[in-house]
Structure formats: C-alpha cells, structure tokens
Amino acid sequence: MSIAKIRLYVDHPLGQGQAVPLTADQAHYLFSVMRLSAGDAVLLFNGQDGEWRASVEQAGKRGGILVAQDQTRPLHPPPDLWLLFAPIKKARTDFIVEKATELGAARIIPVQTRHTNSERIRQDRLQAHATEAAEQCGATCVPEVTALQHLDRLLGQWPQDRRILWADETLTSTRHTLATATRGPWAILIGPEGGFSAEEQKRLRAMPQVTPVSLGPRILRADTAAVAALTLWQATLGDWP
Ligand code: SAH
C-alpha cells in the first residue's frame, strides 16, 4: 500500500474493516484528479472517530469504495469556541472561514449587524471551505458553518455560561483584559468594516458575558482582526501547548 498523503472528510462511520462509499465528487477527486487506483492509501476523518488510514477497494468514474484499515490519530476536537463575524467581501469571508478552521474554532457563525456589508452568504460554499481547510491542516473535526444570523437575535438568547471576547475597535489604547479570563465555552465577536453601531456597543457593554478586548493601537481589517483574536484566545485559553 502506498503512503497516504490525501486526507478526506467523509460523512460515514469509520472503524476497522469499515467500507466507505464515495460520493461522485470524492471519486472524481481521488481517481481522476489525484489518479489513485485500487490499493492506494487515503486518510479519512469524520469528526467522530479520529483519523483512519484507508485503502482504495473499488475505483470508478462516479463512485468507489474505500476500506478503513487502522486508526492513525485519535479524535481531537477543537476547544468550545465559536467565531461570530460579519461577512465581508467574498474572498475575505472565505479567508476568515479557512483561518478559523486552521486556528481551531468549533463553530463559525456569520452575523448580520447594523453595518454588515453583505446580506447574503453561501452557507454551503463556506462549509465546503471549512471542510477543505480541515482536510489540509490535519484537523479531525470540521467546524460547522451556520446560516447568517441576526446579531440582535443571537444576543437576545445568548447562553449564560458562554463568554464573548468582543473585539472592540474603540479600545485601541486600552490594554486587553483576557489575562484574567477563565476557560470554558467562549465566542469571539468581530465586527464589519463599518464597526459596531452605538446601540450594539451599548448592548454588548451591558452583557455580563462580554469581555471587550483591544487588538492593538491600529484598526485592523475584519479578516486580520479575526485571525488576531483567534490567536490571542488560543494562546491564552485554548488548546495550544
Ligand atoms: N470602521 C471601524 C473599524 C472596523 S474594523 C472604525 O473605523 O473604527 C472591523 C472589526 O475588526 C471591528 O469591528 C473590530 O471587531 C475588529 N477590530 C479591528 N481593529 C481592532 C482593534 N484594534 N481592537 C479591537 N478590535 C478591532
């Protein structure tokens, strides 16, 4: 069997000897694009059973079957961290989803704020981006990308025990306060290019779950802010060693 280089997310149980049928897209990718054939090895993960080495049993044009052989990595779910961000231009939104997956967010929630630039997102496309990023970065789980949600509504039913790291652009000259924060369920909130409205700021400041945080003395673009906030959180409260 060849050394497995390709990692693939599959929506199928994985275990020793488990046959995994491929979708037409997966078969096209493995056999037409990557030119794998019977006996070749692939790494599979499904967000539940860790990572498995599998071999190609049947290779067809529109389908195929892999058989899982042995577990190569245990499941390593990301910390219980959500990323809430206001979608921006397509390429920058794609970037945010990709980086959030690599940096280890469990859930990605596009939010509509007062000044959000984009009223629509392609949830399926963003989810596909997250899957691709997880395949590429060695993650054993794929974060869920939800439909666009209204920030107002989301905050109205916000869980008591989930803290919010609010990237607050008005705090550019105040030191961040994450140093005293405790571990547990968290969310990061990044605003749109236009920033948060006065009402949104007032509301966020009044919520006991919210920790306003500065990301430095310069105003960052939303995609940079997302990466900076994820890094800050992961290094302080996350799963980095
Ligand atoms: N138009 C706004 C900036 C928005 S930047 C203004 O000029 O003030 C987009 C988002 O990135 C902000 O809503 C905030 O969540 C985050 N952000 C950017 N720079 C930041 C900083 N220095 N500190 C905290 N958050 C920041």
Image (cartoon, grey):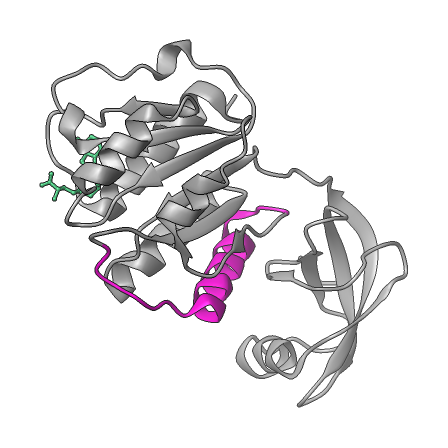
Residue at 42%, 23% in the rendered image: 235
Percent of width and height locating residue 24? 65, 83
Side of 121 where 141 appears, left or right: right
Q: Is residue 167 visible?
A: no
The answer to if 142 sits in the magenta stretch is no
Residue at 50%, 62% in the rendered image: 127
Which quadrant does the N terminus fall into? bottom right
Residue in the foreground of this view, choosing between 6 and 169: 169
Residue at 54%, 28% in the rendered image: 160
Residue in the foreground of this view, choosing between 191 and 106: 191
Q: Ligand 1: give its quadrant.
A: top left
Side of 75 where 197 appears, left or right: left
Furthest residue in direction top, as rendered: 180
Using the rendered view, name the quadrant where residue 126 is placed: bottom left
Percent of width and height locating residue 173? 11, 19
Looking at the rendering, the stretch of residues picked out in magenta corresponds to: 116-140
Residue in the foreground of this view, choosing between 131 and 1: 131
Percent of width and height locating residue 221? 18, 45
Query: Most prominent secondary structure in the magenta stretch?
Result: helix
Side of 84 where 35 appears, left or right: right
Q: Is residue 237 positioned above or below 13 on the image? A: above
Q: Is residue 53 visible?
A: yes
Using the rendered view, name the quadrant where residue 30 is placed: bottom right
The answer to if 119 sits in the magenta stretch is yes
Side of 66 where 31 appears, left or right: left
